[in-house]
Image (spheres, coloured by chain):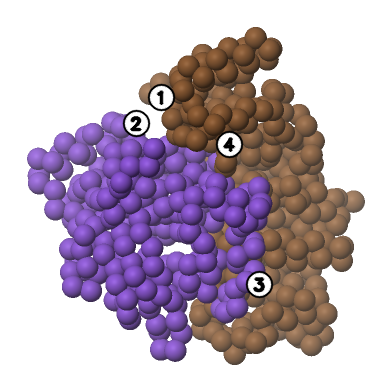
Chain colours: A purple, B brown
Amino acid sequence: MEEKKETVISTKELTKKFDDFVAVDKITFEVHKGEIFGFLGANGAGKTTAMRMLCGLSRPTSGEAMVAGIDVYHKPEEIKRNIGYMSQKFSLYEDLTVMENIKFYAGVYGLSDKDIKEKTEELVNKLGLQNQAKVLVKLLPLGWRQKLAFSVAIVHQPKIVFLDEPTGGVDPSTRKQFWDMIYDASERGITIFVTTHYLDEAEYCDRICIMVDGKIKALDTPFQLKQNYKVDNITEVFYQLARTAKRGDD
Amino acid sequence: MSAITLDHITKTYNKGTTMAVDDISFAVEKGELFGLIGPDGAGKTSIFRMLTTLLLPDKGTGTVVGNDIVKDYRKIRGIVGYMPGRFSLYQDLTVEENLNFFATVFGTTIKENYDQIKDIYGMLEPFKDRRAGKLSGGMKQKLALCCALIHKPEVLFLDEPTTGVDVVSRKEFWEMLKRLKAQGITILVSTSYMDEATLCDRIALILGGKILSLDTPANIVKEYPEKLYAVKSSKMHKLLNDLRTNEDILTCYAAGEYIHLSLKKEDKETENHLLKYLQDKQETDLVFKETTPTVEDCFIRLLGKQEEKEVTKDGRKEGNGN
C-alpha cells in the first residue's frame, strides 16, 4: 500500500552547538506529506532545539535542512509562512476573545480580509463555539483552548504543523478528541510533527523517532519498533533507549 | 486517626460564580499514598491550597494531623511539606542556597536533616552551585521535593509533580515517593497521568470539583461494569471511524496500540455481528479480543456519564464524553 510520498521535511547531519555543548548531533531524517511524525525523547535530549531549527527560529551550526521545500539557512522567514506551530505553554492570547484570536492569527499569516471573515465563521462553527465566540480565551476550559489553538495553528493551511506537547493536563477523553483533529488534518494532507510525554499517543503516530543525547537512536513505525526491541509497548522501547543516555537531565 | 480529613468542603471563586470544589469529603490515612486524579480545572489545586492553609474554604471543615485547617494554620504549616504545581523556588538562588533558605525558614539546617533528603539530593549535588532557574525540568522537580522535605514533614502535598516530565524521570520520581512512604510519611499527590494512578494506595477520580469515584485502583478497575474489548487493524483511524458508525457499539475510543470498545448487548451474537461488519468493511490484520480495563477506561466511562447529565443552556453537550 506504500505509495511514493512527497517529502516535506528532510535533514542531513543537522547539528546545533551551544559553545562546547552539542544539543543536536548530526540528525538525518525525512518526513512525508500527511504523515503523523512523533518526535520523542527525555527532557534534555534535544527535541526543542531540533524543532526550533526546523521552524526557522534557530540557525543550525552545521548540516542541512529543508522544510516545506525551503532551506532553513537562507529563508527562515519564508518557512514561518508555510508552517503552523502550537505548544502547550504558549498558543493563544488569553485576554483576547475566541474570535479575536482567530482573526489575529489569520491576519498574521497573511490571509485576505474576506478569507479571514470566512475562516473565522467556519472555525467557530466547526468547534461548536458559537456561544463562546465573544468570550475571553482565558475563561474557556483548557481542552477547548487546546482545540482552538490547534485550529488556529492550521488556519492558513500550512504544509506542516509543529505541535510541542499539545495535550498536557487535559482529561483522557479530551486528549482523544484532540487526536481526532490531528487525524483529520493529516487526511487533508497537513503533515503533523508532534512531541509528547504521553507514550500511548506515540502509538497513534505513523512513525516515531526517539532522540537520546542529541542523536536519533530509533526511527520507525510503532509496530516495527516494538518488534525490533521485542517488547509490547513503546514505553518499554523508550526506557531501553533513554537509559543509555549519558549526558543526563542537566 | 486520619492524617487528612475533608468534611463537605466547598470552594468557589469570582463571588461564587466559579465552582472549584463542590462539597467534597474524604480522608487520607496515616502513611498512605493517596492520589487525586483529574484534568486541569478539576479542583485539585484548590484542595491542596486549602489543606496547606493558603486558602479558606467557603464551607466545610478539614484537618491535617488533627489540626483544623482554619484555626490551626500555624501548626499545620510547620508539619507539612508542599510542592506547588508551578515551580516556586528562587530562580536566582543556587540549588544549595534554595535548600538552605527553606531549612532556615523552618528553623533547621541541611546538616541536621540530611538523612531525609540524601537519596534525592545526592543526584543534585554535582549541580549545587547552579542557579535553580538554569536547571532542567527533572532537576527542578527533585530540588522542589528536597525543599519540601528538609524540615521532616509528617504530610507531603505534591501538586502535579510530574507534569511535563519525561517517562523515565516520572518513573524515578514515583520510586522516590515509594521510599518516602516507607518512612511513614503521608503523601497526597495529584496527577493528570492515568498510568500513575495505579502506583497509589487509593485514588479519587475528580472532575468539576466533584469526586466521581474513590477506592483502591484495583477496586475501581474491578467495578467496571461492561465487558471491554480491544481491537486493532493495520489502519487504525479507518477502523475507529467504521466502529463509530456501528449500531452495536456502546462506546469506542483509541487506547494506545488498540481501540477499546464496549457493546450495547454482551452476547455472542452481537460479537459475531460486529466481526462480520468489520470483515465487510475490509479491515486488514484484524485483532479482536477481550481486555482488562485500566484506570483510564474507568475515568473515560465516568466522564461519559457526567456528560449525559450535563447539558448546557444552549442545548449543546458540554464536557468530554465519547
> Badge 1, how many Cα within 10 Å: few under 14, some, many 20+?
few
Q: Position of residue A176 (x, y in %)?
A: 49, 39
For the residue marked with disc 1, what is the amino acid? Arg
User: Are labels 4 and 2 on one chain?
Assistant: no
Vertical position of residue B106 compared to residue B6: above or below: below
For marks 3 and 4, the one nearer the N-term is 3
Task: Report, in whole angstroms, how far the alpha carbon at label 4 lies from the one at label 2.
Answer: 29 Å
Q: Earlier in the sequence, mark 1 or mark 3?
A: 3
Q: Amino acid at mark 3?
A: Lys
**Residue B64 visible in this rendered orientation of the protein:** no
Task: Give the residue pinned by disc 2.
Answer: A128
The mark lying in front, picked from 1 and 3, is 3
Q: Which element carries disc 4, helix, strand or loop?
A: strand
- Label 4 marks a residue whose chain is B
Task: Answer yes or no: are tags 1 and 3 on the same subunit.
Answer: yes
Task: Work out whether residue A233 or residue A109 is closer to the camera in this orientation and state it.
Answer: A233
Dot label at residue B316: 1
| Helix, strand or loop status at disc 2 | loop
Q: Depth-wise, is mark 4 or mark 2 nearer the camera? A: 4
The foreground one among B294 and B17 is B294
Label 4: which residue? B258
The location of residue B93, given as percent across then percent down, is: 56, 85
